[in-house]
Amino acid sequence: MILPARRWFAGAAMLALVAPLALAWPTAATWLVTLDAAWLLLLAVDAWRSAAITADDITVRRQVPPAFSLGRPLPVTWRWEARLPRPVVVRVAEEFPSLLSLGDAAERVLRLAPGSALYETHVVTPVARGKGGGGALHLRVSSPWGLAWRTLRVETPWPVTVFPTLVGASLRALPTQSQRRREAGLRAARRLGEGRAFESLREWVPGDETRTIDWKATARRRKPMVRQYEDERRQQVMIAIDAGRMLTAEYEGRARLEYVVEAALQLAHAAVDHDDDIGLMVFADVVQRYLAPARGRRALRSVLDALATVHGTLVEPDYPAAFALLAQRNRKRALAIVFTDVIDRTASDALVSQVGALRPRHLPLAVALRDPALDRLATARAATVQAAFERAAAEELLQAREAALADMRGRGVLVLDVPPAGAAEAVVAQYRVLKRRAAL
């Protein structure tokens, strides 16, 4: 498509300014018509010369990071090259991925010289977590005389992944606990006990339990042999995130689910740092994502990739189906950390009963995100009658909520009742306390 440029419109405006001379000087009308026709002819010739320009004549390559994380702007470099015999001016309007922001640089003007590449670098800021795409470029290439623009569309697919805020060491630089011990010259000491991790065989001695006898080894060696086990030091940590309506409310301009995602990521970092297996389940009315517990940086990468696409929905969570799947797929004892919220015993009856049913196979820890605004309202001094009613309603809601949490504790569930901003620090601290106490 060809569009007249500002230069051509400026010339046409100058010709229009001299049009009133035709009233006083009739001969000027002939010259004016001739100049108008010549100006239109120049536009047509210039447009015809630029019509041969195609999208293949303008090449662009984008050098981007493999992924972004919230709160960390990163540079992106574009490499432009024009396969044309003359310099051109290119006006660029880029369809930027909705997860990223380029500011005013999304529309820019470039001057490309023939036979040489032009590099431009801009700082890109992630604005939302998730996965998306974009990258189409809408170009206007100047004609040889600058009287017209040749419009082009260049497809440069740009798949984008924005991870949650990465706090602390980067994923690649995060060593496991066992790796740090090896680098320090330490070795793991095996501790014999009642665990189920096989350590070795030895000859039976009086006092050994008969259930530890390995009958196959006894037949091969023709003497009683028993199995020795060592305590299992590596445990499983299963993170369950309620992505239903309970966490869609906002706190300080952010959905409470965003605080949960950041807390889950920091907890996953801590679990890998302690050489534990880490798994993830995200559910609402259906189970949206399930990752079986696994070990090391690869498991952490899988959790990080899954957390990038977690989004809340205004639906009622199906707790029975979610926890039934968790119990079915995860037979080994695990620390099951459930991020959710409760309202009262009636509204949260399904949650309370299902979390409590995880015992005794698993050790459940419910992380409930309380509303600081409701706390402030319940403790504020009432200056009017309406404020008094609001305070009474807030106190009633908090009492009902505390009753639901007490019911959960009575079923043997560990409970963390924390504000959204403090969820990450509190859950990691609680995890480390449970590790020190060998609660699993």
Image (spheres, rainbow, N blue to C red):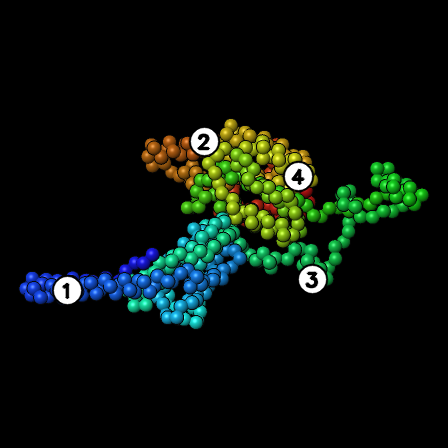
Which numbered dot is residue 32?
1
Measure how far apart labels 4 and 2 are at the Cα level.
Answer: 38 Å
Helix, strand or loop at disc 2?
Answer: helix
Q: Mark 1: which amino acid? A: Leu
- Looking at the image, is mark 3 or mark 2 nearer the viewer? 3
Residue furthest toward the left? 24
- Looking at the image, is mark 3 or mark 4 nearer the viewer? 4
Q: Which callout, 3 or 1, points at the residue further toward the start of the chain?
A: 1
Q: Residue 51's x, y, as percent?
A: 35, 61
Measure how far apart labels 2 and 1 are at the Cα level.
Answer: 85 Å
Q: Residues within 10 Å of mark 3 (few under 14, many from 20)?
A: few
| Mark 4 vs 2: CB contact within 8 A | no
Q: Which residue is mark 2?
A: 396
Against 417, residue 265 (above or below) is below
Measure how far apart labels 4 and 1 are at the Cα level.
Answer: 87 Å
Q: Which residue is mark 3?
A: 183
Which residue is at 54% across, 54% downward?
167
Q: Which callout, 4 or 2, points at the residue further toward the start of the chain?
A: 4
Q: Mark 2: which amino acid? A: Glu
| Mark 3 vs 2: CB contact within 8 A | no
Against 138, residue 436 (above or below) is above
Q: Residue 329's x, y, as percent?
A: 65, 38
Q: Residues within 10 Å of mark 4 (few under 14, many from 20)?
A: some
Q: Which callout, 3 or 2, points at the residue further toward the start of the chain?
A: 3
